[in-house]
């Protein structure tokens, strides 16, 4: 029979999973209401905040398989939200860069996204959010150090 600590770990996993699922579902619904899928939003958000990125590195930065990146970039390029830009120093490298139209779209959408997230997380006080950030970060770092 599992000890209370083992049961508590399972309970924590379930609670974290359910909270993450609820936040993601609400966030994804908002993103889809604005004409994007979550992956398209993630690519645009990366370019909006970090500037041009090599296509080969976008997948790692938003945790997406590289094969899907080409499809997503194609869709965003058709909507004129981003452009492909060749690297002058290395012809093997192509960058994705947000366009003026993409920036204007994100100028409107991102503050709304931030506000929605704030509303979703409003059940926690500022201090509780800070504590949660520290604890979940500690957990994530400790898991990276484990090997199976």
Image (tube, helix red, strand yellow):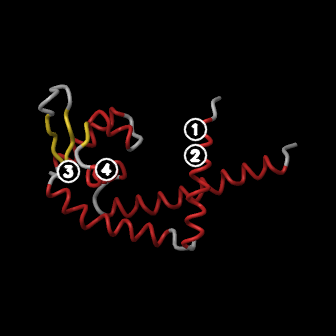
Residue with the mark numbered 4: 46
What's the CA distance linking mark 2 and mark 3? 31 Å
Residue at 38% from the left image edge and 35% from the top image edge: 65
Q: Does the CB distance between marks 1 and 4 fall below 8 Å?
A: no
**Sooner in the amino-acid sequence: mark 2 or mark 3:** 3
What's the CA distance linking mark 4 and mark 3? 9 Å
Q: Does the CB distance between marks 1 and 3 fall below 8 Å?
A: no
Residue with the mark numbered 2: 140
Residue with the mark numbered 3: 98
Classed neighbour count for the residue bearing mark 4: other residues with Cα under 10 Å, few (<14), some (14–19), many (≥20): some
Q: Which mark is residue 144?
A: 1
What's the CA distance linking mark 1 and mark 2? 6 Å
Residue 27: image x %, image y %?
42, 61
Residue at 56% from the left image edge and 66% from the top image edge: 129
Residue at 20% from the left image edge and 50% from the top image edge: 98
**Sooner in the amino-acid sequence: mark 2 or mark 4:** 4
Residue 50 or 58: which is nearer the viewer?
50
Q: Does the CB distance between marks 1 and 2 fall below 8 Å?
A: yes
Residue 16: image x %, image y %?
61, 55
Tell me: 106 left or right of 29. left
Question: Which of the 4 image quarters holds residue 59?
Answer: top left
């Amino acid at each position: 029979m599992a000890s209370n600590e083992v049961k508590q770990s399972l309970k924590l996993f379930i609670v974290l999973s359910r909270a993450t699922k609820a936040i993601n579902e609400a966030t994804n619904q908002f993103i889809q209401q604005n004409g994007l899928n979550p992956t398209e939003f993630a690519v645009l958000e990366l370019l909006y905040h970090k500037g041009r990125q090599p296509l080969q590195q976008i997948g790692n930065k938003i945790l997406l398989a590289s094969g899907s990146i080409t499809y997503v970039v194609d869709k965003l390029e058709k909507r004129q939200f981003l452009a492909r830009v060749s690297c002058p120093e290395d012809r093997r490298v192509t960058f994705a860069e947000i366009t003026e139209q993409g920036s204007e779209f994100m100028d409107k959408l991102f503050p709304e996204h931030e506000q929605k997230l704030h509303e979703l997380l409003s059940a926690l006080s500022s201090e509780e959010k800070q504590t949660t950030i520290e604890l979940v970060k500690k957990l994530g770092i400790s898991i990276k150090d484990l090997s199976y």
